[in-house]
Image (spheres, rainbow, N blue to C red):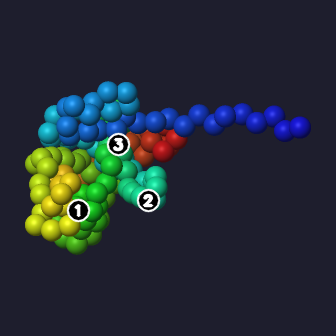
Amino acid sequence: MTDFKKAAVPLSTTLVFDEKEAGEGKAFLGMQVTGDYVEMKENIGPNESRIYVIRVAEKLYSIWGSQLLDEKFNKGDDGRPVPVGSVIRVTCNGKKFGKTGFSKTKGYWDYDLEFAPANPSFTKAANEKADEAGY
């Protein structure tokens, strides 16, 4: 009989932009968060969403993607994706409501995304730390 062992997967804390949602495994750090962009994970969960992993004060956090946020990460400022290793600032502008469909009834979270290139030596160190953490 095979002796299986459970794999340990380091989890990051999920960032939420609604203070009422903070709790077990979820952190509210305010409506604006600045950190180092460590990694993007794709096809996560039943909706095959993206998760953006950022480092804030030496702690890893995850931000769930959305159609709007994914588009901003994909296009950067010149049509190319925001590079891993960049310093990013995500600002949540609150919940917005569209004129039709799902966005009219449930709304969606509106975000601004800003980024600046990281120091190349920092990027290398960030990638090494991410590898050590299992990302």
Q: Which residue is mark 3?
A: 62
The answer to whether any part of residue 121 appears in the image is: no
Residue type at mark 1: give it. Answer: Phe
From this viewpoint, which residue is outermost toward the top?
A: 23
Instruction: From the image, state whether disc 2 or disc 3 is nearer to you.
Output: 2
Q: Name the image quarter holding residue 97.
A: bottom left
Q: Callout 3: helix, strand or loop?
A: strand
Instruction: From the image, state whether disc 1 or disc 2 is nearer to you.
Output: 1
Write the residue at 37% across / 27% down: 24
Q: CA distance from mark 3 to mark 1?
A: 25 Å
- Residue 105 image position (x, y, % from top left): 18, 57
Crowd tier of the residue under label 3, counting other residues whose Cα lies within 10 Å: few below 14, some 14–19, many 20 or above: many
Q: Nearer the viewer, residue 95 or 120?
A: 95
Write the residue at 46% across / 52% down: 45
Crowd tier of the residue under label 2, counting other residues whose Cα lies within 10 Å: few below 14, some 14–19, many 20 or above: few
Write the residue at 22% across / 31% down: 20
Instruction: From the image, state whether disc 3 or disc 1 is nearer to you.
Output: 1
Residue 135 lies, with reference to residue 48, above or below; the image says: above
Residue type at mark 3: give it. Answer: Ser
Crowd tier of the residue under label 1, counting other residues whose Cα lies within 10 Å: few below 14, some 14–19, many 20 or above: few
- Residue 98 image position (x, y, % from top left): 12, 63
Q: Nearer the viewer, residue 129 or 33?
A: 33
Q: Earlier in the sequence, mark 1 or mark 2?
A: 2
Quarter of the N terminus within the rendering: top right
Q: Callout 2: helix, strand or loop?
A: loop
Q: Earlier in the sequence, mark 3 or mark 1?
A: 3
Q: Callout 1: helix, strand or loop?
A: helix
Tell me if label 1 and label 2 are in contact, CB under 8 Å: no
Tell me if label 2 and label 3 are in contact, CB under 8 Å: no
Write the residue at 31% across / 46% down: 63
Q: Which residue is mark 2?
A: 48
Query: What label sits on residue 102 in the rendered view?
Result: 1
